[in-house]
Image: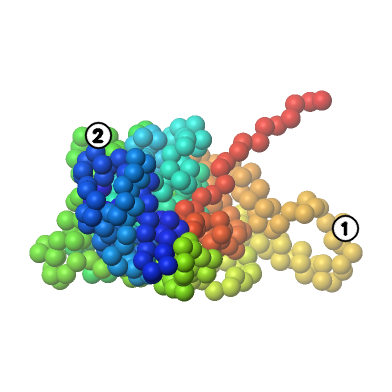
Amino acid sequence: MNLILVSLKRIRENGEGEFFFQTDERQTSHLRSILMVQLNQVVKVGVINRGKGEGVITEESTRHYTIKLLTPMHLRKAEDTYIPIDVVICIPRPKVLNKFLQQLSSVGVKKIVIVFSNFANKSYESSRVLKNEEIKNALQLGLEQAMCTQFPQVFIHYSFSSFVMNIDRYSDERTIKLCAHTEVRRSAGCVERDILGAERGKILLMVGCERGFSELEIFLIRKLQFRFFNLTERILKCETALLVIIGQLLLLTENAALRPSGRKMLRQGGDTIGVGDTNGFSGMSDVSSTECSNHVGRQNGCAGSEQGPRGPTTENDPFGEIKKLLATEPSFPHQLVKAVNDFISSKANHSEELQRDPCDEQKNGHLTEGATDIDALLRSIHALSTDEEGNFENIYLSLLLKKIKYKNKFILSYADQQKNVDDDGVFIYRTQPYVSKKKKGPS
């Protein structure tokens, strides 16, 4: 613990305008047993998602130390920078995940995406490691080691399809997407040369779980334009592979001597996320306030792209978006494209008939009551019988259609500050866990 990292709400002010806080049990044990601090000793202190500086130990007891801040660091913005690397982890064993969170926050990763892949153990969903408090504690341990205060953002997807539908949240046209996998032939082109030549942007690195990826997941990863690579023919443990890959990527992005431009790779969209100033506190009141918490949430809670907050959502023509989708995805089989176009044409003809004679709506049996157009299209796609590769194409198109259907819902869920951001501005987003629906037997 090179830095004592403390929550804003634990800082108190006395009548003389001095700020104090008390260490928790873990910090107290480390200060006493490892650092062997003494009264009046100066120690390094930081405030979560805010500034850092020094404090002096003014009081010692069996349960805690009382430390006075030498500067009002909790009123300053965090000055830490993120590396241009985000990481997608297909969830490993809980103990390994806890170590991952510590290590990734320590090296300066901004976005950590945890995905439940097909081969992941579903019992991990109930692991205490995935509780918000445990995630926050693991991230804090890594930041205390690195002497930083700015927390990364954590995203949890309980299915691989959910991650596929929300890939735009984690990448843009400047993102170099990499997937570490030994059983797939390395993608054409030199990944290392492309990274060295990129002056701005970022890298989105995906690492599988212990059992790797399923055939469908590999197909979807290719569709998302990830480039497969491996460092060695040997199969490494995921905890070993992640650290080795991060080390190599840091060498390619942070070592200016190796880069043709002579400069580090700059993360697109800004290197820091500021937190707001707080003022106007008196007496022994809690330094945190509703206004401060809201400001921190606004600054740290944006889970969308790094280009700024999104505007109000608008309803678009779904069939227009589907036609545009088919035009930009030439790989779909002809049979699949024809089925979708026929469905859209039939819906257009049906709408024209209803405009001429609204009474025909009661006679028409194309849609079940309450079903949407996209739901009906999804059912028609699922009914298509094809080989395995064609079935993968059907699944991919179905995910893209669901992405259109739930677009506004996704935007609102990512922007839900009250749900995703805590009092310290730590952002943890999670989708709803998957619950299988059991069919009822005959009564």
Q: Helix or strand or loop: what does disc 2 sit on?
A: loop
The answer to whether residue 8 is above or below residue 320 is above
Identify which residue is drawn at 22% across, 47% down.
Answer: 37
Which of pointers 2 and 1 indicates the residue nearer the eye?
A: 2
The answer to whether residue 346 is above or below residue 355 is above
The answer to whether residue 81 is above or below residue 212 is below
How crowded pointer 2 is (Cα within 10 Å; few <14, some 14-19, many 20+) is rated as few
Rendered image: mark on residue 16: none
Q: Position of residue 130 (x, y in %)?
A: 46, 42
Q: What is the image's colouring?
A: rainbow
Identify which residue is drawn at 74% across, 53% down.
Answer: 371
Quarter where residue 224 is shown: bottom left
Identify which residue is drawn at 82% across, 71% down.
Answer: 355
Q: Is residue 13 visible?
A: yes
Q: Look at mark 1 in the image and give the residue it sits on.
A: 362
The answer to whether residue 234 is above or below residue 148 is above
Residue type marked 2: Ile
Q: Position of residue 25 (x, y in %)?
A: 37, 42
Instruction: Please identify the residue farthest to the right as the structure is shown.
Output: 359
For the residue pair 187 and 260, the one nearer the viewer reads as 260
Quadrant the C terminus occupies:
top right
Identify which residue is drawn at 30% across, 40% down.
Answer: 29
Q: Look at mark 2 in the image and give the residue it sits on.
A: 235
Quarter where residue 267 is shown: bottom left
Q: Answer left or right for 345 relative to 107.
A: right
The Cα–Cα distance between marks 2 and 1, rounded to whole angstroms, is 62 Å
